[in-house]
Structures are given as structure tokens and as C-alpha cells.
Amino acid sequence: MISLVYDRMQRPMSQAAAYHGDVLDRPTTRRRSGKQLLRWGLMAGGVLAVVIGGGAYWLTGGRWVDTDDAYVQADSMTLSTDVSGIVASIPVHEGEAVRKGQVLFTLDPQKFQIALDTARADLAQVRLNIESMKADYQAALRDTAAKQQQVNADQATYDRYQALVKQRAVTQQETDDARYKLAADQQAVRASESQARAQLAKLSGDPDIKVEDTPAFKQAQARLAEAEREMDHSVVRAPYDGVVTQVNKLQPGMYLGASTAAFGLVSTDHVWVEAEPKETQLTYARAGDHVEVSFDLYPDRTWNGTVESIAPATDQNFSLLPAENSSGNWVKVVQRIPVRVRVDLKPGDTPLRAGMSAEIDIDTGHVRTLGDLF
């Protein structure tokens, strides 16, 4: 009886508690559902944002070609000369900016001056010799003419003796002497003619030839020109505007042999950037494209430039030991193609030094489309 009453009292209380629990669970369930929807929404939005961002990056990313494998290059040379001599003077010093045609160093001019004076004297002597040969040729002609007259007289005498010997007016001995004298004088004429031909041959077959047109004069003139060239090359001048370097390698009083390196000269006018981007980056790059150039030495400034040329071959083609791809152990390597960039320098710009590191961005102007994906 008591348990029955207790059960009746507990049943309403249990129903009330269950009702109260259902009421409390409904907001919790709603909050959980909202969080799940928010989570799924954020995940979908993140994926969508990545897709849209990646697509936008891909569509706009094919326009620029950038690389930091780039260095400043400039015309540079090691000065030398093709004549030998003692270094007389070096009027420049280390790091000095020089102009085209400025004297960089000179060799002792004494031996070159002696050679030049000798060549000039030889040329004058050749001129006199040619004039003398012309006179000798005319003398040989006159001598031949005189001897020919003697032959004519001998011939007349011999003819008379032949007529008189038949009449026994002269002896046979006198007739033979006249014949022998005629023959001797005829040989003298031939010898004189040969001498005249020899003189004429020295005049190139033209007795009235100009002295300047004879081979002997031209040869002497060439020796004089060579002496003048050596004299001129004993003074070494700058072939272009630039800065001299390693000047202390050359000192006055040193013997400098022909073609021996003296010191260096680096151009300040013809400066460019040599870059080597990957071959896969140059699909749309062309000569004339605009370039933005920056240098590690000047991080706060950007220069404008232009693609001057794209090499017709990779560096691999010019390697001393190119890769041998005929073996079975071949591994494909992305090649690099040299690109020359002309930097637009303005008066007063900070100097660019050969070997400086640079970064370039080439604007190819190419715009990708969604059609490129399919």
C-alpha cells in the first residue's frame, strides 16, 4: 500500500523532469547544428577562396619573368701592345676614370725613333736609286746606238776589203781582221742591248715609270709605314671611356714584351645585365620587352631596362665538357638561356660595377585565359 502510494507520487515528478530535460536539450541541439553549418560553410568558403585565389594568381602570373641569377657585365680588357720596349711613363693611377684616346702608358721612344729615321733614309735612297736606274737605261741606249754605228762602219770596211781582195789590192789577212772586228763589235752591241733590257726590267718595263709606282719604292714605303706604326703603338691610349684597374702591375723601367698584359680597363659606357632564367620561363619573352632591374648594392631603387637579346643557344652548347645524353643514365635538367638586358642609365646615376648581383623582372605583356587550361 505504501509502495503504491510512493510510485504514484514519483511518476508525476519523473514526467516533469523528462519534460524539463527535453526543453533544455532543444537549444543545445540548435547551437550544435549552427556550429556544424558554420564549420562546413567556412570549409567550403576556404576551398572556394583557394580556388579563386589560385586561379587569379595563375591568370595573372604568366606575364612576368623574374630571376635573381643575373649579374652586371661591362666591356673589359687587359691592355697590351704589339711592340716591345721599356716602360717610360704611366700617367694614370689606380681607379682613375679615363676618356677615349687618353694616354695610359708609353714605352721608351728612342729605338722606335731610330727605326723610323732609318726607314725614311731608306725610302729616300730608293728614290735616288730609281732615278739612277732611269739614267743608266738612257745611257745604255746611247751606248748601244754608238756601238751600232761602229758596227755599220765595220760592215762597210769589210765589204770594201772583200771587193779589193779579189783584185789583190789588200791582203787576205787584212780582210780577215776586218771580218773579226765586225763580229766583235756586233757582240758588243748585243751586250749593250742586254744591259739596257736589264735596266728596263728594274723599271718594270716602263722607262717613264713614276718613282712611287716601282716595287722597290713601295717596299721601302711599307717599311716606313711599319716603323711609323710601331712608333705610334709605343704610346698606348684608352680605346673607350672607362676606369683603369690593377695599374700597379706595371712600373716605369719594366721591360714589356709584345702582347704582354699591362693592366685592366673596364668600360663605363657599355654596361648591361646578363641574366640566365630557366628555359621554361622564356615562353613569351621577346627582345624589346620592358624590364625592371634592381641591384643588391642599391636595394631601395629600381632601374628601367629593355631586353636587348636572348641567346640563340644555352650555356650547355658552349661548355667545354657538354653533357653526354646518349647513355642510359640520362637525367633531364632544365636549361638556362642567357638574356642580355640593357639598363637605361641617366647622367648622374650611381655607378654600376661589373660583377654586381642583380634581379630582373621582364614584362612579357602576355595575359593568360581560361582557354589555356583546356
Image (cartoon, grey):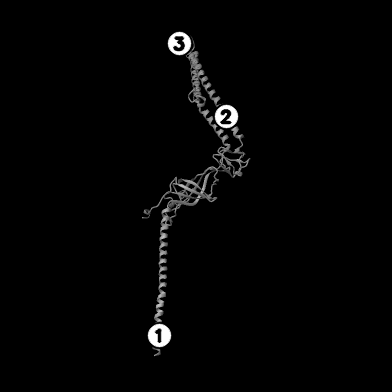
Disc 1 secondary structure class:
helix
Q: Nearer the viewer, residue 292 or 262?
A: 292
Residue type, numbered disc 2: Arg
Q: Residues within 10 Å of mark 3 (few under 14, many from 20)?
A: few
Judge whether residue 112 can be spotted in this image: yes
Residue type, numbered disc 1: Met
Please tell me which of labels 2 and 3 falls first in the chain.
2
Quadrant placement of the N terminus = bottom left
Location of residue 113 in the rendering, given as x and y in whole percent from the top left corner: 60, 33
Q: Which mark is residue 163?
A: 3
Judge whether residue 314 can be spotted in this image: no
**Residue located at (54% from left, 32% from top):** 225
Quadrant placement of the C terminus = bottom left
Please tell me which of labels 3 and 1 falls first in the chain.
1
Disc 2 secondary structure class:
helix
Please tell me which of labels 1 and 2 falls first in the chain.
1
Mark closer to the observer (1, 2): 1
Residue extending farthest to the right is 253
Residue type, numbered disc 3: Ala
The residue carrying mark 1 is 9
The residue carrying mark 2 is 120
Q: Nearer the viewer, residue 314 or 125?
A: 314
